[in-house]
Amino acid sequence: MTFKNKVFNFLLLNLLLTFSSFIISQELEPCNIVSSFSSNHGGIFSTEEIPNKEFDTLLKKEYKLSKEFEIQFFQNSDEAEKLLVSQYPEVFQNTNNGYDFRTIDNDTLSARNIKGVGTYDRRVTTYKFKGRLKNYIIISWMAYEDWGHLIVDIKNNFTYNFPGQPKFISHNRVYAHTNYYGATTMKFANLETGKDLTVNYHNTRVLKVIELPNENIVFKLKRDDCDFSINKKFELFQL
């Protein structure tokens, strides 16, 4: 066997070994969805995977939440802000181009309008008064590579932060979700007890949401980097 043939056989063997290792690694690490959970104040919940057939059956029923849980959106953010400041000065105290709010854990959440120099100035932050549902005021906020919504309870003077636009599924239960640079974040909360649940799904986006009449929620999730989706049902027992 010539030296060239030996080199060729050596390279071919290494190529086959590399390809075999790739196949084995793909089998050991299937395309699945990785999640992480966190909860405050002892929220109890369960989550389960449901088959596509069950998901499609639920989807066809076209469940709709009661209109009493629909947020009434403001037509003009500035006018709504002025009115609320005049009506609830103890809640909306404008300092340093915005507001500081208190959480149920006595932490601080802020909404600020800070102008910067240029589009990509990391100091830039903005907020808008978005809407209202009974004693809850919704404020959207945006900062450098970050965003969310605040729900200000003008009755108890507590404020909650959500990753996306919140939706009420009862008079005190709220959920929201957003996609943050390829990762999906969901938050469920009880605005009266302060119990909440935050779920992160990595490299995943929400395709569809079904809000069930019993305050449970079903999400269809899909991995962005492979052809894999899953249906997750959340049952919020003590939240």
Image (tube, rainbow, N blue to C red):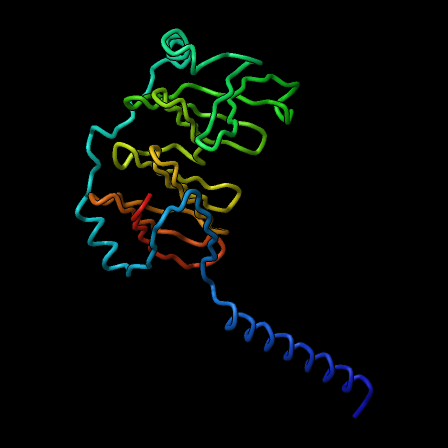
**Above or below: residue 39 compared with residue 48:** above
Q: Nearer the viewer, residue 165 or 216?
A: 216
Residue 219 lies left or right of residue 178; in this view the side is left
Residue at image position (34%, 21%) is 155
Point out the residue furthest to the bottom here.
Answer: 1
Residue at image position (47%, 63%) is 31
Residue 30, percent from left and from top:
48, 67
Q: Nearer the viewer, residue 159 or 76?
A: 159
Residue 142, percent from left and from top:
51, 27
Residue at image position (49%, 46%) is 183
Residue 27 lies left or right of residue 122; in this view the side is left
Point out the residue furthest to the left here.
Answer: 61
Q: How many marks?
A: 0
Q: Nearer the viewer, residue 5 or 223?
A: 223
Name the image quarter holding residue 112.
top right
Q: Nearer the viewer, residue 17 or 103?
A: 103
**Which corner quadrant holds the N terminus?**
bottom right
Residue 207, percent from left and from top:
36, 47
Residue 85 lies left or right of residue 70; in this view the side is right
